[in-house]
């Protein structure tokens, strides 16, 4: 029998899952009656049938939030979506059709979002809005770059990459990150507590080993890859300006996806103490994001990578992206592919 169908049939809820039994009822039904795109049913159709079997009746909204969305977080099967309704994916053809459906929807929404942001930025009379205090969930976002922000070396180094790791600061497993890096230093690398982990100091085997280790942590990552041969020499001929623009480009992408954030950047000079440019950089990022509500950016700091496990983790991921683009070796990225949010390209003809 198809593994996707079998996994859905075998799925069982946890003892403390308040909606678990209803989720089991739903999976049992679709694994029999809604397998494959051709047998998709609308949510309204399903609720007409299953509300008689569920422990309580669900509205469309409550069904999506308490039954459907949590099940899409499970592994081993996936409930696809299409114009005809929802269905249990049975093969790669179904999966690709659902990916296509999501891609069209995402592209459409991002276009609308971009248009709205352009209107907001140009509105000189807009009122300054305070970010809702009720939204206490804050994402910690750590940035690091791979390569040099200069066009003078574009032949030997054709890409400049900025990467960001996004961590839910309220997640209890967040604290495990420092424990993981202590284990990596002492047990895997045989180094001291103060050793700075950088991908370019690791051989292939160790880099892959460390990527496998951090794949067990809870985070997501996004990045932007700048194609130097396609950049205007006049606009990008100054390294510090290029650096600021590149980081802000990714900041903008991240802010459109998240609520409140703390932004943490690796310092540009690599010195132990903050420099004048570090302060200029912070002011630049702030000035480019004034149109957001007050409190959207909760905190903004420049860090010393030697003292930050989080920045060092970004370095490991940025190195994996670098090897994929420069060396055409995607085996590093494949180890953390389930953590990837998006890898953007600049310039991008779609934008």
Image (spheres, rainbow, N blue to C red):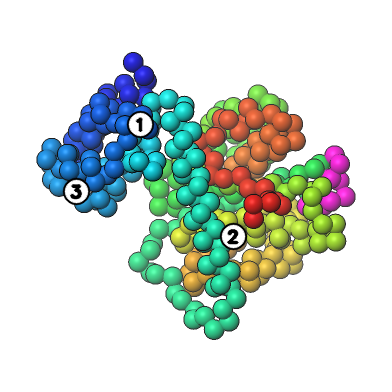
- Identify the residue at image location x=43%, y=25%: 91
Depth check: 330 or 114 in front? 114
Q: Position of residue 234 (x, y in %)?
A: 85, 61
For the residues bearing labels 1 and 3, Cβ distance under 8 angstroms: no
Q: Which residues are magenta?
A: 149-156
Secondary-structure class at tag 2? helix
Verify whether residue 103 appears in magenta.
no
Find disc 3 in the rendering and name its residue: 58
Q: Which residue is mark 2?
A: 252
Q: Is residue 183 visible?
A: no
Which mark lies nearer to you, 2 or 3?
3
Kind of element beneath mark 3? loop
Task: Work out which quarter of the rendered image holds the N terminus and state it.
Answer: top left
Q: For label 2, count other residues whose C-alpha is less than 10 Å away and answer few (under 14), some (14-19) or many (20+).
A: few
- Nearest-to-viewer mark from 1 and 2: 1
Residue position marked by numbered label 1 in the rendering = 38
């Amino acid at each position: 029998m198809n593994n996707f169908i079998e996994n859905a049939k075998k799925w069982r809820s946890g003892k403390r899952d308040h909606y678990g039994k209803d989720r089991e009822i739903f999976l049992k039904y679709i694994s029999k009656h809604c397998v494959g795109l051709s047998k998709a049913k609308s949510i309204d159709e399903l609720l007409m049938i299953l509300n008689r079997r569920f422990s309580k009746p669900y509205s469309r909204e409550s069904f999506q939030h308490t039954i459907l969305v949590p099940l899409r977080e499970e592994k081993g099967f996936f409930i696809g979506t299409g114009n005809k309704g929802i269905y249990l994916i049975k093969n790669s053809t179904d999966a690709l059709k659902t990916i296509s459906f999501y891609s069209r929807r995402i592209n459409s929404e991002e276009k609308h979002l971009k248009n709205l942001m352009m209107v907001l930025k140009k509105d000189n009379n807009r009122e300054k809005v305070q970010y809702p205090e009720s939204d206490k969930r804050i994402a910690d976002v750590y940035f690091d770059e791979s390569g040099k922000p200069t066009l003078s070396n574009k032949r030997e180094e054709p890409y400049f990459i900025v990467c960001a790791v996004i961590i839910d600061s309220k997640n209890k497993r967040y604290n495990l990150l420092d424990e993981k890096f202590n284990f990596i230093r002492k047990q895997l690398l045989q180094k001291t507590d103060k050793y700075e982990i950088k991908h370019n100091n690791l051989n292939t085997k160790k880099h892959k080993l460390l990527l496998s280790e951090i794949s067990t942590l809870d985070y997501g990552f996004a990045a932007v890859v700048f194609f130097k041969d396609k950049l205007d020499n006049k606009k990008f001929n100054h390294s510090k300006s290029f650096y600021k623009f590149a980081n802000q480009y990714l900041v903008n992408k991240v802010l459109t996806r998240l609520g409140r954030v703390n932004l943490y950047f690796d310092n540009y000079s690599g010195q132990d103490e903050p420099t004048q440019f570090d302060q200029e950089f912070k002011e630049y990022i702030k000035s480019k994001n004034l149109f957001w509500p007050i409190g959207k950016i909760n905190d903004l700091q420049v860090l010393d990578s030697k003292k930050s496990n989080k920045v060092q983790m970004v370095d490991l991921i940025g190195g994996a992206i670098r090897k994929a683009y420069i060396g055409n070796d995607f085996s590093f990225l494949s180890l953390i592919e389930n953590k990837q949010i998006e890898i953007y390209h600049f310039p991008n003809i779609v934008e």
